[in-house]
Image (cartoon, rainbow, N blue to C red):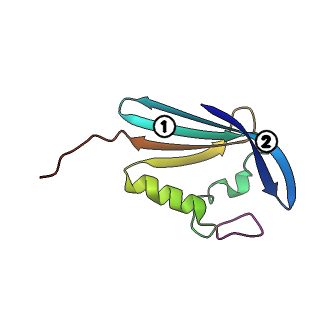
Amino acid sequence: MVNKPHHQRLSGHARWGLLRVTGTESDGIVEITMEDSGVGIDPAVAERLLEPFFTTKPVGTGLGLAIVKRFAEGHHGTVSIENGPTGGARATIRLPHATAEVTP
């Protein structure tokens, strides 16, 4: 687990927040969760956050989260984004635990 202050820029206003990253492994699934102490996710845009070229920011391409989703799916995993239980946003990446395979 990592608790780290991080700098956010939203709508041109800078502020400091907390970013918490945790990782677990259970039943062959590796789960990486990132939670922040920001304002959370607007329900009106939550379903679109993983779409390519969708952004709520004045700059950027809207590809970052779409690339994360594509990477996870390419490794038979998933990505979910939601509001955290105590505020802020939570993103979770779930991937199957890799096993070493020897190829002749």
Q: Is 13 on the left or on the right of 22, as rendered?
A: right
Which residue reaches farthest top?
Answer: 26
**CA gap, disc 2 to disc 1?**
23 Å
Judge whether residue 21 is colored magenta: no
Q: Amino acid at mark 2?
A: Gly
Q: Nearer the viewer, residue 14 or 70?
A: 14
Chief secondary structure of the magenta portion? loop
Q: Secondary structure at mark 2?
A: strand
Residue 75 in the image, given as x and y percentages of width and height? 37, 52
Judge whether residue 55 is colored magenta: yes
Q: Which residue is mark 2?
A: 17
Which residue reaches farthest right?
Answer: 13
Range of the magenta residues? 54-61
Does residue 59 lie above or below 83 as drawn? below
Q: Secondary structure at mark 1?
A: strand
Q: Which residue is mark 1?
A: 31
